[in-house]
Image (cartoon, rainbow, N blue to C red):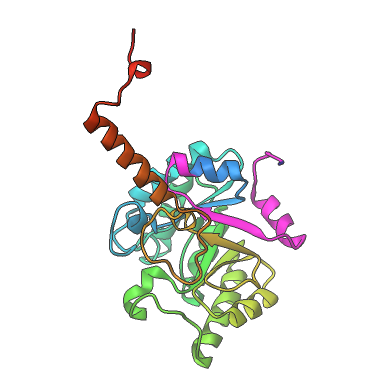
Amino acid sequence: MDRKKVNLPNIVKLYEAGERISMLTAYDYPSAAIADAAGIEIILIGDSLGMVVNGYKNTLPVTVEEVIYHTRAVVRAAEYSFVVADMPFLSYQTGIHDALYNAGRMLKEGGAEAIKLEGGSAMAETIKAIVHADIPVMGHIGLTPQSIHRMGGYRIQGRDEKSYNILLQDALAVEAAGAFAIVLEGIPGTLAKEITSKLHIPTIGIGAGKDVSGQVLVFHDLLGLSGHKQPTFVKQYAQLKDIAVNAIQQYVKDVKEGVFPGAEHTYK
């Protein structure tokens, strides 16, 4: 495997060569080190950290400081992967000045190489301003978790003709604003395919079918660490939670029975 650090021009080259792009969330040094060693091209510090790591009910409570903290940890491990930090709720919706400042913090304080934000046409001017400040932006449309209350929950978007056309226009607006890629979440595969065919930037799907430029999953979902019922689009490649629970149960047993520590674990 070529271990030269992935950068933005590399991602563009992958897209232009028709090679699908792999992206995975990671929220700390150990998970980022695993993803990096496995050859993931893009690591995303998603605001999903609020639910996955901190136990929030949704992503809305996540702060800029939390994302920066987790980004710093990921960056220390990312020797190969390109690192993208998520812009949490209210870090960019309150105006371009706030958006520029907080996006800059993700790079300056967190060490990220790009940021991601949710929203389509309504966020076009914000995206344009951030890109103009030489901060690479990844867009995100479809099922946008920060809009959970407007959507009435985590519902598939773009199923009716009106919302289908709105999302298509949103994707075009995000591209025109200067985003280098766009996440398509929770939309029909037919819509994702059409968006991908009309854009000239990579589309990264999550619950958007296979006709996109790349895929993203949550680290804990992929490895079976979350313990929750998974959405249809998640493929679990391992069941590490079960392995971990069994290992710890054996540790508890050894402690109770005085088996651990043994002589080999004791200093002479």
Q: Does the image show residue 93? A: yes
Q: Is residue 1 left or right of residue 174?
A: right
In the displayed structure, would residue 165 be above or below residue 15?
A: below
Report the span colored magenta.
2-31
Residue 255 position in % (x across, y down): 25, 30
Q: Is residue 1 left or right of residue 186?
A: right
Q: Is residue 219 left or right of residue 93?
A: right
Residue 29 position in % (x across, y down): 45, 39
Residue 56 is a magenta residue: no
Q: Among all residues in the image, which is located at the extreme bottom? A: 161
Residue located at (47% from left, 81% from top): 157
Q: Quadrant of residue 21?
A: bottom right
Residue located at (33% from left, 20% from top): 262
In the displayed structure, would residue 235 be above or below residue 119?
A: above
Residue located at (47% from left, 71% from top): 123
Q: Does the image show residue 109? A: no
Residue 146 position in % (x across, y down): 37, 68
Residue located at (54% from left, 61% from top): 216
